[in-house]
Image: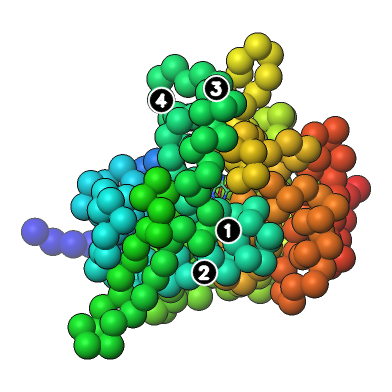
Amino acid sequence: MKISKRNNIIIVAVAFMIFLLTLIDYISIRRVTAERVLMDTAVRITVYGLGRDRKKLEIAVEEAFGEIARVESLMSSYITDSDVSRINNAGGAFVAISAETANILETAKRVGELTDGAFDVTLGRVMKLWDFTGSEPTVPDESTVNEILTGSGNDKIEVTYNDATETYYAQFTDTRAMLDLGGIAKGHAIKQAARLLRARGVKSGIIDAGGDIVVIGNKKGKPFKVGIRSPDGDGILSVIKADDTSIVTSGDYERGFVQGGVLYHHILDPKTGFPAGGTRSVTVVTHDPTIADALSTALFVMGSDTGIALVDQLDGVEAIFIDDTGVTHLSKGAAGILEPKE
Ligand code: AMP
Ligand code: MG
């Protein structure tokens, strides 16, 4: 077959076009994004990197989901052989646990102290009584709640390290206590996922686990924009400028049920065993997502006055409260990280 000169030129031009397009893809920024349901939440991971690294980015994203699943397998009370379930089912005996779970329990206890008991990971039995995740939850009897509450408190869980066995152990000092790490485990999970992504060379990305967010770096030199949603579900109230930080929100709209026209939500005041009043949502912005998660739950319980007074004493922590009248309250530095309103 003879190829004419004209056809030759066309072939060369097409080959050059293909080469050029491949080159552009190779050196320009591409987005890799995926979503999985983990920890009972839709988790979306998005990373940005060069086109030539796309395959590597895809693998890193998969590994990051794997990290979240791994944390879930340690800390979920729904998984029977998790550290948390083994502690809950040990009847007060010593249980060998991972260093990671031990660390989270210690952190939880510290946040419990810092917040005057507003954060309490031993509310497991009270949470079970409310059964927010059940098919037909109802308001429990107040005297039953009070009775169960006497068996909870951060002092009811002890963590020790045994030098001889080089192992951490946890033990309940009250057999009625039950762990529920629902207020902190997700923060830790996204922290580990972000750590994995950074270790794989990711310089820009965002992990969003249903409102618990970690932002890695920024987006082409500009901060990522993260919206604070209205508790009533009608849009975004304000926008946070986020650069290499975490943004975690606790809201009354996340889980709960309505009975007699009243919303009973899943964030309990450890003093009463009933849903904490006065607040609709709290967003915490700080570098460590584990702290952001635990604090957002605790601050929700504390309310805006006491909560902001505490946050203003902490370095590198900002909070945005929306109270039950719809008014927004900001910690001292929060205005500086919000997009100005038009
Ligand atoms: P979050 O969405 O991070 O505010 O976490 C709420 C979850 O934390 C609930 O579903 C419970 O599992 C747990 N929880 C509820 N109240 C408290 C509390 N006062 N302290 C610690 N954990 C809590
Ligand atoms: Mg929380």
Disc 1 residue lies near ligand 2 with CB under 8 A: yes
Which numbered disc, 3 or 2, marks the residue closer to the eye? 3
| 3 or 1: tag closer to the N-terminus | 3
| Residue contact between numbered discs 3 and 4, judged by CB atoms under 8 Å | no
Q: Residues within 10 Å of mark 4 (few under 14, many from 20)?
A: few
Mark 1, residue position = 294
| 4 or 1: tag closer to the N-terminus | 4
Q: Does residue 101 show up?
A: yes
Spot the residue most to the bottom. 164
Label 3: element kind: loop
Q: Which amino acid lies under the numbered mark 2 shown in the image of this protein?
A: Thr
Looking at the picture, does residue 180 appear above or below residue 83?
Answer: above
| 3 or 4: tag closer to the N-terminus | 4
Q: In the rendered structure, find residue 134 and report the number of the disc placed on it.
A: 4
Q: Residue at horizontal 57%, vertical 27%?
A: 143
Mark 2, residue position = 107
Mark 3, residue position = 141
CA distance separating discs 2 and 1: 9 Å
